[in-house]
Image (cartoon, rainbow, N blue to C red):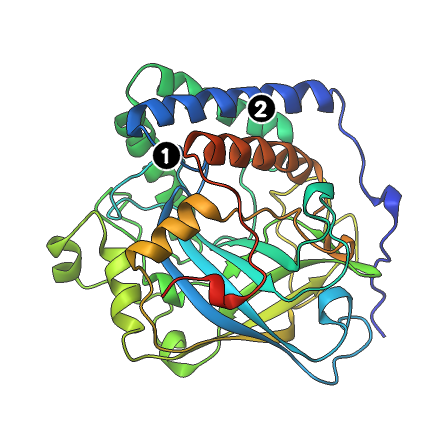
Amino acid sequence: MTNYIPYSDNIEVQQSDEQQINNKIVESMARVNRLMYEKHRHAIRDAHAKSHGILKGELQIYDNLPEHIAQGLFKSPRSYPVIVRFSTAQGSIMPDKMSVFRGMAIKVIGVEGEKLLPELSDAVTQDFLLVNYPIIPTGTIKEYLAAQENIEKMADSGELLQQIGQKAAVGVQKVLAAVGLADDTNQLSAPGPHILGDTYFSMAALRYGDYVAKINVKPLSENVKALAGQKIDDQIIDNDEHAFLTEIIASFFQSGTAEYEMGAQLCTDLDSMPIEDGSVQWPEEKSPYQPVAKLVFHPQETFSAARRVYADDVLSFNPFHCLPEHRPLGNIMRVRRLAYERSSSYRHHMNAQERGEPQSIDELPE
């Protein structure tokens, strides 16, 4: 029998000068937020600012899960409605033609029980935030601070689109190419494969009930499996290099149904599967992802004006908006808790929009 590491409150280790570093990161991000507001005259997220599709779906928890993965939200078989937002990672609105990480944010509706964030303790929602890469390249807050200060420096020079776009996109392209998520040309014109064929990861660890895990979501139905690694047609890109990711999602769901599978990779060894360094990929030969649930999406309009406004201006997605049994872990996640709340509050205030947590899937506009 596999020995899974039990969760305990002391599994996290505070970093030296963590509070001071966190404050510097959050203040830098807030300054960039203000610069982006002045650029767009509309407040946007400090990461994953650009939506590409907002989907209504269903999360179906599998029956007869073994005890070690029947934890927290996944303890009992049940179906939950979900809102899923596909995005790209930059904190600015960039052309889709530029290679960057993609995101899948999942809001599960109908989750009873007190939530971790005090201000959302009575909400009936739970969020999972995933990216199409298994690790956080800046795995500790010291590395993250250096990257964030560089972003602010470029933003303050008034050349954010040019410099971040050119330097970061080529760097990301190399990382994506190394794991087969894009080609190896290292050109800004290489946009990576079809967004619906990607596998998405929590990157960092989270509490998983009595244990510790990472989460992923991968294609399950044959039609989205077939999109994994599939090059996007040049004609589609040429028709609209700024918004072709939005177009290919919308086109697929005009008539298509998609299924994805959610899995949990439980920690078995804190040395090779660390909590405090998000840049270390947990070896699947030591602990493979185990299926826990299925995501199902039926045909729908994925980017109506009303849906876009609802997802971009009303909703927030926060990895700490969760049951305590799924609390994110590690120093990068601890600073993200501060940053997400600061960014969300600023965005809603400047856009004169009240933050909303849906009580029902019916609140998602058609």
Q: Which residue is depicted at the point 60% across and 35% down?
A: 341
Quadrant where the N terminus lies? bottom right
**Residue located farthest toward the bottom when viewing the structure as drawn:** 64
Q: Sequence-wise, which precedes: disc 2 or disc 1?
A: 2
The image quarter containing residue 297 is: bottom left
Residue type pointed to by label 1 = Ala
Could you tell me which secondary element the residue under label 1 belongs to? helix
Q: CA distance from mark 2 to mark 1?
A: 18 Å
Q: Looking at the image, which is closer to me, 105 or 139? A: 105
Q: Which residue is mark 2?
A: 25
Q: x, y (%) of residue 326?
A: 73, 55
Query: Of the numbered discs in the image, which one, if any, rests on residue 80?
Result: none
Q: x, y (%) of residue 68?
A: 81, 71
Q: Which residue is mark 1?
A: 168
Residue type pointed to by label 2 = Ile
Could you tell me which secondary element the residue under label 2 belongs to? helix
The image quarter containing residue 34 is: top left
Q: x, y (%) of residue 218?
A: 50, 69
Q: Residues within 10 Å of mark 2 (few under 14, many from 20)?
A: many
Q: Which residue is depicted at the point 56% across and 20% down?
A: 27
**Residue located farthest toward the top when viewing the structure as drawn:** 157
Quadrant where the C terminus lies? bottom left
